[in-house]
Amino acid sequence: MQRQLIQPCLLVLTIVLTLSSCFNEPDYPDAPSIDFKGVFRYPVAAGQGVGQPRRDSVVITIGFKDGDGNMGNDIPLAKADSLNYAQNGGWGNYEIRTFRLVNRQYVEARTPVNNFLFFPDLTKGKPKGAIEGTLDFSQLFPYGNVNRMYPTKFQIRIRDRSLNASNVIETDTISLPYPD
């Protein structure tokens, strides 16, 4: 009777050990790397009341990989962390630059909302190690009284809490409203 139980247990143990040896933790560099996944524009109807004009919501999706998993920050940001980012490039852990096509040339359209961006700690309460995933960034482009649609693209990079910066990626071009 016991021999009949030992054989299936050994078989299950062998299968589990074989399968567990197939799954190794990925070996990514400590500096994050990113790739472009997509950019989508969603028209948002005007709301009622002041400050609720018609607008376009743009969502940019990027993929990321990081070897030590120290991505994101506690929000609100600690004063020391804020100072550390400000003294090392003047941008947070998410940098997005907006470019619009004017006279057949892409010109940077500086937007104050993009100056100091952060995303939350992605590994809070989890063990240190390699991570990968996607990040979505959403931004609104309101319509004014007089607008003009411009082809627009974005350049993006991120950095981790150790201030290791990723590569820079560029999105596809989409048309967005800008006040004239």
Image (cartoon, rainbow, N blue to C red):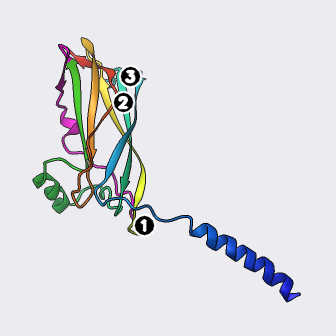
Q: Residue 142: image x %, image y %? A: 30, 23
Label 3 sits on residue: 48
Span colored in magenta: 102-124
Residue type for callout 1: Lys
**Residue type, mark 3 in image:** Gln
- Answer yes or no: is residue 157 visible: yes
What secondary structure do most residues of the magenta stretch adopt? loop
Which of the numbered marks, if any, corresponds to residue 43?
none
Residue that extends furthest to the bottom in the rendered view of this protein: 2
Residue at 28% from the left image edge and 27% from the top image edge: 153
* Residue of label 2: 58
Q: Residue 87 location in percent, x, y?
A: 10, 54
Q: Earlier in the sequence, mark 2 or mark 1?
A: 2
Q: Would you say 135 lies left or right of 86 here?
A: right
Q: Distance between the residues labelled 3 and 2?
A: 21 Å
User: Which is more toward the observer, 16 or 51?
Assistant: 16
Looking at the image, which residue is at 34% across and 53% down?
120
Residue 128, placed above or below residue 141? below
Q: Which mark is residue 126?
A: 1
Is 93 magenta? The answer is no
Residue 115 is a magenta residue = yes
